Amino acid sequence: MTDQSSNNLPDRVERLEVDMTDVKISLNRLIDAFYQNNAITTNAVERLAEAQLQYMERNEVRMARIDDRFDQVLNRIDEMQSEVRGLQTENRRIWQVISDRLGLE
């Protein structure tokens, strides 16, 4: 049995070497797949970040437009309030003239 075992030893060593080569190839494929997957994920994250940045920039522009419009509306309200105060003053003056002419207090 010892002779047979020692005769099989070179075959067993050769099979072990083949198996180790297969394991090495599989590990290399796994490492390659990991790096490819990592590159794909990194690319996807970068594209997502770019899309988010563009979205935020568009929203920033929209918000600036809304702020401008809001300021315009507030300015117009101030103008209208000033006009109303002027009309109220004019109205009081007219009523005073009418009151004076009619002899009312």
Image (spheres, rainbow, N blue to C red):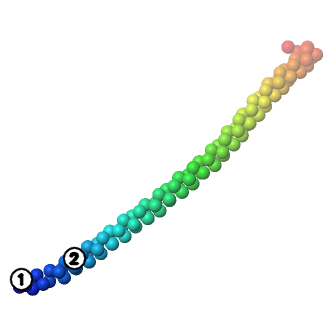
Looking at the image, which is closer to me, 61 or 16? 16
- On the image, the x and y values in percent for residue 39 come to 46, 61
Q: Which residue is mark 2?
A: 16
Instruction: Tell me which amino acid carries mark 2.
Output: Leu
Instruction: Tell me which amino acid carries mark 1.
Output: Thr
For label 1, the crowd category at 10 Å Cα-Cα, with few meaning under 14, some 14 to 19 and many 20 or more, is few
Looking at the image, which is closer to me, 44 or 57? 44
Which secondary structure lies at badge 1? helix
Q: Which residue is mark 1?
A: 2
Which secondary structure lies at badge 2? helix
Instruction: Establish if 26 lies above or below 35.
Output: below
* Cβ atoms at labels 1 and 2 below 8 Å apart: no
Instruction: Establish if 21 lies above or below 41.
Output: below
Tell me the quarter of the picture where residue 100 sits. Answer: top right
Q: What residue is rendered at 47% in x and 57% in y? A: 42
Nearer-N-terminus badge (1/2)? 1
Tell me the quarter of the picture where residue 29 sits. Answer: bottom left
Q: CA distance from mark 1 to mark 2?
A: 20 Å
Q: What residue is rendered at 19% in x and 82% in y? A: 11
